[in-house]
Amino acid sequence: MGCFFCWIVVSFQRGIAREIEAQNKWAQRVEMSYFFVLSADDALLRSPSSSRTRTSMRPTLALQVRGGGLGLLMCSHLPRKSVVPAPLSRRAVPIYRPNHSPYYVGLDRVREDPYDRVANPHGVIQLGLSDNKLCLDLIEDWMSKHFESSAIGGGDFAMYQPFDGMPEMKLAMAGFMSKVLGGTLSFDPSNVVLTAGATPAIEILCFCLADHGNAFLVPTPYYPGFDRDMTWRTGVEVIPVHCRSADSFTLSITALDQAFDQAMKKGLKVSGVLISNPSNPVGNLLSRDMLCNLLEFAREKNIHIISDEIFAGSVHGDAEFVSMLEILDLVEYDKGRVHVVYGLSKDLSVAGFRVGAIHSYNEDVLAASKKLTRFSSISSLTQRLLVPMLTDSGFINTFLGTNRDRSRETYKLFVEGLEQLGVNYLDSVAGSYCWVDMGGFMSSYSEKGELELWEKLLEVSKVNATPGSACHCAEPGWFRCCFTTILKDDIPVVMDRINKVAKLCKHAR
Amino acid sequence: MGSHSSNRTRVPLSRMAMGNGHGEDSPYFDGWKAYQIDPFDPAENPHGVIQMGLAENQLCADLIEEWLIDHPEGSICTAGGSDKFRDIANFQDYHGLPKFRNGIAIFMGKVRGNRVKFDPDRIVMSGGATGAHDLIAFCLADPGDAFLVPTPYYPGFDRDLCWRTGVKILPVNCKSSNNFKITKKALEEAYNGAVDAGIRVKGLIITNPSNPLGTTLDRATMKDLVDFVNEMNIHLVCDEIYAATLFRGPDFISIAEVIEEYDDDCCNRDLIHIIYSLSKDMGLPGFRIGIVYSYNDDVVRCGRKMSSFGLISSQTQHLIASMLSDDEFVERFIAESSARLAKRHGYFTHELERVGIRCLDSNAGLFVWMDLRELLAEQTFEAEMVLWRVVIHKVKLNVSPGSSFHCSEPGWYRVCIANMDDQTMEIALARIRSFVLENMMGNCMRVVRSKESKAVECKLKVSFSNRKMEEVMKMPCSMSPCSPMPPRSPLVRART
C-alpha cells in the first residue's frame, strides 16, 4: 500500500541538538526507539495542504538524550494525532503484555473451559488454584442462620472507616489468628493492620522494608504470585534461594548465607527474607529449630523476616505448626524484625472477600502500613458480616476441626490415586495441594521437558496443574496439584486423565 | 504484648516508611486531628468540633438502608441470598463479577443521562478512588514523570498519585478572577515549565465535577483539554467521582460524551481514562468501590492485573450488582439525592449570604467553596492559616483551608455540607453567625477607638454595611463556644 518513508534517527552533536530544541518551544522528548514510519499516502494526508488534517501544525522536533548517546529525529510537522502513542509507564510494559507464565495461562484456560461433572464433563479440571472449597457449606450455613437482612442495613458502617480495619474486625481477626497461629499466643489488635487480602499485605511490607533496588531472599520453590506481589510496583528484587528434593525442599541456612554473600558481592542490598510457612507449594512445615536459626541469621545480617503463614490453619497431617511469632515470644529482643502475613482466603475459604492482615511489633512498620493500606482496605460491609462469625468460638473450633478432617481425607484419596499410577509425591502435612514428581513422564530432564509435559496435561488431558518452573523450582518435573477445589468423586477422573498423559509419554519414548 | 519500639531493633526501614510522602503532616490534617480529639456529638459533646472537612454523602443513607432491608437476596450472607454463597465467596478473579461490571457500566450511563454508553469490559476494579488514582499513576508514569493538575485540587492527590509511584504533580494555576476556569494559557505555561525543567509530562488530571470548587466544566473547556492532550500526546485522566452529585444546571458533561464528537484521527482515545467510585455518588465510601475506566486496551490489561492489589470484595460486588440492577431504585435514588443536595446547598449558601459570606457559585459536589478573603487581615497564606486556626479551635468547625488544595490565592475554604443532619447543620450555621457577629463587633470597636485616639490612621476592612449588621444582630445565635474577639485579634489588625 504505497511505499513507506522511514524517518531515520541520526546522531548529532549534543550542542546542535540543544540549539534546535531551544528554538522550538514545542519540542517534546521521544523515546530513542521510536521511528516515524509513514506511508506515502499518510505523509500526503498529513501535509499542511491537506484539507483532511486539522489546524495547529507546529514545527516540531523530537530529540532525546539516552545513555550518553544522542539522536535527532527530524520531522517537519507532527500530525495532530501523533503516530507515536503516548506510552504507558516502563513498569507497566511487562504487566500489560500477555503473560506466558504457565501459572496464569493455566488459570485462563480453566476460566475459558471450566470442568463441571454434569454441565461440562470435558472441561479443564482446576488443580492450579489453592482455594479451599471443602468447607464452604459450613460457612454458608452459619451465615444464612445468623443474618437477617436488617442486620446488614442500619448504622453508619457504609461511611468511611479506619483504613486499617474497623476496631471490632481487628479484634476479631486478632482472636482468630491466636487460635490458628498458636493457641498459647494472644495477639493485640494494635499490632494488626488489615488489608484487602494477603496480596497487598506482601506488597505493603515490601514498600516498608525495602527501597527501590533492594532485594529479598526467597527460598524456592515459591508461590508464583510472590513475583507480582513483591516486584511489580515496589522496585524490589527477588533472589531465589534454591532448596533441594534431597532435603525435602526444606530451607537451608547455608544456602541462605551463600545467597546473601553473593548478593553483597553484586552490590545488592538485602532487606530481608520471605518465607512461607506452611510452605507453598511444597506443603511442609518449618521446625522450631529452623525458625530459631532463621531468626539468628536475620539478626546476624540485620535484616527483616516476612513470614507468610496464610496456610497455618490448613494442617492436615500429623505435625504441629509453629508460628514465627511463637519463637519471638521466647525472646525479648528482635521483635521488631519479624512481620507475619495472614488472611482468610485459605483457612476460612473466603478468598473472594479479600481479608488479609499484617502483624508486626515494629511501631514504624505498623504506622507506615496503616497509611499504606488505605489503597487496599477491606470493604466495611464484609467486615461487618465476618465479625460475628469470627467471634463465634464454638463455630470456629468446629470449622477448623472439620476442615482438617476433610482435607486429610481428600489428601489421602488423592495420594492413593497417585500411588496407583506409580507417581511419586512429597508427603506433605499442610496446605491445600500436593507436590507431585512427574519427572518420569518428561521427554527430557529439563525445564523444556517440564513445560512440554505441562502443555500435554493442559491441552490433552485437560488438567491444570502448576509446573515447578513457575514456582522457580531448581529441579524440573515437579508439579503443584491442589486437591481442595475438586470434589472427592472427581479424584478418579483426575487420575484417569493423568494416566492418559503418562501412557502418551511412555509411548513416545 | 504491646508494640516494640523499633529503637530496640534497629533494622533499617525504607525511605517510604520513614518519610512523610503520605502527607499527613500537612495542616490539612491538623483540623482532622482537632476533630478526632474533640468530636461534636449533639448529646455527648455539643461543644465539640463539627466535621466539615470530610466530603461524605450521608443525605441518602436512609434510602440505601431501606433497600438493603427489603432485598435480602442482595446479600449472599442472608437466608435470602445464601444459595449464591459458594460461588461468590471463593471468587477472586480480577476480571470481577460480570454482573457487577454490567451494573456499574449501566449506572455510569444513567448518571450521565444515558447520553453515552459504557463498555463493561473496560471496567477495572480498585480499592476506592484512592486505589484507582494510585493504579492509574503506576500504569501511566514512571518515577520522576509528572502529571499536570489544575488548582485548586483535592489534597489527597499528592499522596494518591505520588507517594508510592514516585510521580510528581505540577500545578496548573487557575484564578478566581474567572471562577478558576482552566485556560489554555495556564496549561501551556505549566507544560512549558516542565519541559524547561527537564520533567517529562505524562498526563493531565482533572476532576469534573471539581473538588473543591463544586463546579462542572463547560463543553468548550472540555474540548480545549482534549485538543491539548492530543497535541501534546499526553494522557487525560478525568476523575468523575462526583458525577451524580449534580444538583442544578448547567449539566454535567462527561469526557465520555465529549470524545464522541471527535473523529478518530482528531482524538486518540488511547489517551482517555476515567476514574470513578461509588463513595460520593451513592454515599458508600466504606465499601471501597473504585473504578478505572480506560479507552486504552493496554491500560485495561495492565490495570486489571494490578487490581489484584485492591480487588473489591466479591460479596460487595454481588450486593452492588443487585442494587444497581434495580432500575426503579437507582433512578429514584439519583433524583432524590440531587434534590436533597440542592436543598442543603441552597439553604446553607443562603444563610451564609445573609451574614455576608459568599461562596463560589457551584452546581455539584458535597461542599461549598467559601470566600473569606475579606476577613483576612492581609491577603497572604499566613493570614489564611491564622483565620483557619481560629475557625478550628474557636469556632470549632473543621473546614479545609484553600492552601491545602494548592489554591493560588489565599482566603478560600472548602466546607463540606452533606455529611451531617439538619440539626447539626443549624448548629454549624449558628456558630458561623456568632463568629461573624463578633468579628464585626470587634471591627466596630476598633474603629471607635481609633477615631477617639486619632493616633494611627488605620485601614480596617469593615466588610459589612451597618444595615447588614443590624440583620445579623437579629439572627439566632448558638451558645457559641468561642469567646468574643479580643481587640488585638489579627482579624482586626490595623494596617498602616
Image (spheres, grey):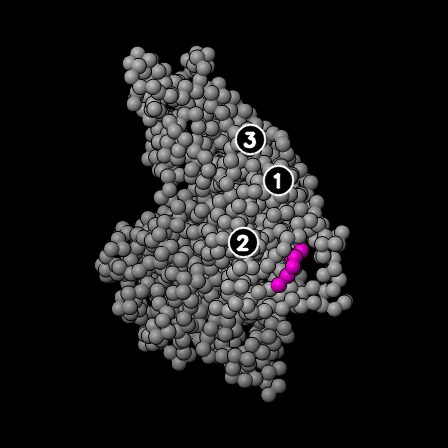
**Foreground pick, A256 / A139:** A256
Q: Which residue is mark 1?
A: B221
Lower sequence index among marks 2 and 1: 2
Please state, as top left, top right, bottom left or bottom right, where the C terminus of chain A lies in the image: bottom right
Secondary structure state at the residue bearing disc 2: strand
What is the magenta range? A74-79
Which residue is found at the position 53% from the left and 35% from the top? Answer: B180
Which residue is found at the position 36% from the left and 38% from the top? Answer: B30
Same subunit, labels 2 and 1: the answer reads yes
Q: Which residue is mark 3?
A: B362
Residue density around tag 1, few if under 14, some if 14–19, many if 20 or more, within 10 Å: some
Query: Magenta: predominant secondary structure element?
Result: loop
Relative to B323, does residue B197 appear above or below in the rendering?
Answer: below
Closer to the eye: label 2 or 3: 2
Relative to A159, does residue A36 appear above or below in the rendering?
Answer: below
Which mark, residue B202?
2
Relative to B438, does residue A380 appear above or below in the rendering?
Answer: below
Which residue is found at the position 47% from the left and 53% from the top? Answer: B197
